[in-house]
Amino acid sequence: MSGPILQLRDVSLSFQGIKALNALSFEVARGEICALIGPNGAGKSSLLNIINGVYRADSGSVTFNGEQFIRVRPAHAAHLGVGRTFQHNALFRHLSVLDNVLAGLIRQSRTTLLEHAFGVGRDRRETREFTRRADEIIAFLDLTRHRDTVVATLPYGVQKRVDLARALVGRPSLLLLDEPMAGMNQDEKHEMSRLILEANASLGTTIVLIEHDMSVVMGLSHHVVVLDYGRKVGDGSPEQVRRNPDVIAAYLGTAH
Ligand SMILES: Nc1ncnc2c1ncn2[C@@H]1O[C@H](COP(=O)(O)OP(=O)(O)OP(=O)(O)O)[C@@H](O)[C@H]1O
């Protein structure tokens, strides 16, 4: 399919009179890594929540892969090919890495409750196929040695990789990452950047990510959109955005 993978047109959202997003429009090209930046409270997470159906925009429209919606249920967004990670990872801490990654495939299950209860027919075939897919993504993200380890015992940077594996296993065409490097040290950020670039290059996944660390943003993204008080104040290549005086005033000048 040609054309942008994602288009937002005049999207607005308010919470009790506070405009979190104010007539926001931008496009994400197929295959790019697009960073959303802006000060705290600028509306970045709200925007991701609209794209994957957690929130409903008050007005405007979102077009994903040619399908336009104002409200999409999260399950339908996942079905259309939108994957997501959250700012505070929502892993099953007491389950293994493999089980957490398999959880990313639950929505694609076609097994009936009865087949699942007796472990027969489609259930057995599906389990084999899902495990194969999970192992593939576990290897892709360098997690094979942790495959059977309980997530809670793993270092934080590795847990964030498990979160990425769970989001990637369903092979979304658009992956939304909410602060994938939050709380990481420089080495972990470097490793996570490498994996995001690799997922983008080898799996062809379009990525929209929220990130505060400007050196990460500049090194990773093809395209940067800058928000401030729910409005777009910059939109272009990392270089264009870095030189935009409105952006410097709104964001880069702000202590973070
Ligand atoms: N569920 C909610 N209920 C009420 N207000 C909300 C809710 N979610 C977001 N807001 C408000 O909407 C505005 C935008 O918040 P949002 O979390 O989208 O910003 P952000 O750019 O992601 O911030 P941060 O960088 O701190 O995560 C803020 O004023 C916030 O307080």
Image: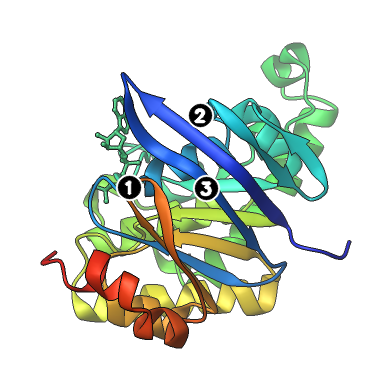
- SS of the residue at dot 3? strand
Percent position of residue 155, x then y? 22, 61
Seen at 56% across and 71% down, the residue is 33
Q: Nearer the viewer, residue 168 or 54?
A: 54
Label 2 vs 1, first from the N-terminus: 2
| Numbered badge on residue 87 | 1
Seen at 42% across and 67% down, the residue is 145
The label nearer to you, 1 versus 3, is 3
| Numbered badge on residue 54 | 2
Q: Tell me: 250 left or right of 73.
A: left
Report whether the residue tagged 3 is closer than 8 Å to ligand 1. Answer: no
In the displayed structure, 84 sits above or below 209; it is above
Q: Nearer the viewer, residue 186 or 38?
A: 38
The label nearer to you, 2 versus 1, is 2
Report whether the residue tagged 1 is closer than 8 Å to ligand 1. Answer: yes
| Numbered badge on residue 67 | none
Percent position of residue 163, x then y? 43, 52
**Between marks 1 and 3, how big is the CA–CA gap?**
22 Å
Q: Tags 2 and 1 in contact by the CB under 8 Å rule?
A: no
**Ligand 1 sits in quadrant:** top left
Residue under label 3: 24
Q: What residue type is labelled 1?
A: Gln
Q: Which amino acid does label 2 sit on?
A: Val
